[in-house]
Image (cartoon, rainbow, N blue to C red):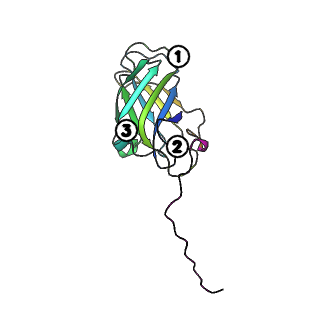
Amino acid sequence: MSLFDGSRVIGEETGLQIEIESPIPLDPGCIIHLSLPTDFTGLQKLMHSVTAFGMFGHLRDVDFQVLPEPETKNLVEIRGACESHASNALKGTINLRYVRNPETVRDTGPLTVKFFDSELTLLAETKSTNATAFVEAAQFRAGPLSNFTVNGTDRTV
């Protein structure tokens, strides 16, 4: 997973590029659930585009929705990525535009990917390779510091 098409500054909008390896081949009509770390915010408001390619065929827009229930706050459901049989011998790439970066420079939590058939029967589940850091802190940077004032608390010398 990497940040792309946006800012690396904490608290600002960015895109996410997620490289996926499926443990199984995927049939047409598959449904993918991406559970993003809660460090990323603004999905309901900011996300306006999801594209897929690689194991999913040529680069194209796919249908998606950010599920609104509180317990699934950062769950993105993707439909239409599997237009035809998708071999697990290839990696797939999913681009999400846009989310808000975490508010502090730190590693984020893990990403979980679930693969379902067209009837929402769970076929497989995988987590980010580094279970504690989906996006490493080194990918973020602090923004500029502006509009601050220093006031003394004691005026005696």
Side of 121 where 88 appears, left or right: right
Where is mark 2, residue-wise? Answer: 8
Q: Which mark is residue 105?
A: none
Q: Amino acid at mark 2?
A: Arg
Q: Amino acid at mark 3?
A: Met
Q: Position of residue 102 (x, y in %)?
A: 50, 48
Q: Which mark is residue 90?
A: 1
The foreground one among 148 and 28 is: 148
N-terminal of the pair, mark 2 or mark 1, is 2
The question of residue 57 being in magenta is answered with no
Where is mark 3, residue-wise? Answer: 47
Query: Could you give the CA–CA distance between mark 3 and mark 2, rounded to whole angstroms?
Result: 17 Å
Q: Amino acid at mark 1?
A: Leu
Q: Position of residue 40 (x, y in %)?
A: 46, 44
Q: Is residue 149 above or below residue 34?
A: below
Residue 52, quarter of picture:
top left
Element assignment for label 2: loop
**Callout 3: 10 Å neighbours few (<14), some, many (20+)?**
many
Magenta span: 137-157
Query: Could you give the CA–CA distance between mark 1 and mark 3, rounded to whole angstroms?
Result: 26 Å
Q: Position of residue 9 (x, y in %)?
A: 52, 47
Q: Is residue 13 above or below residue 87?
A: below
The question of residue 151 being in magenta is answered with yes
Element assignment for label 1: loop
Q: Is residue 66 above or below residue 92?
A: below
Q: Position of residue 53 (x, y in %)?
A: 45, 21
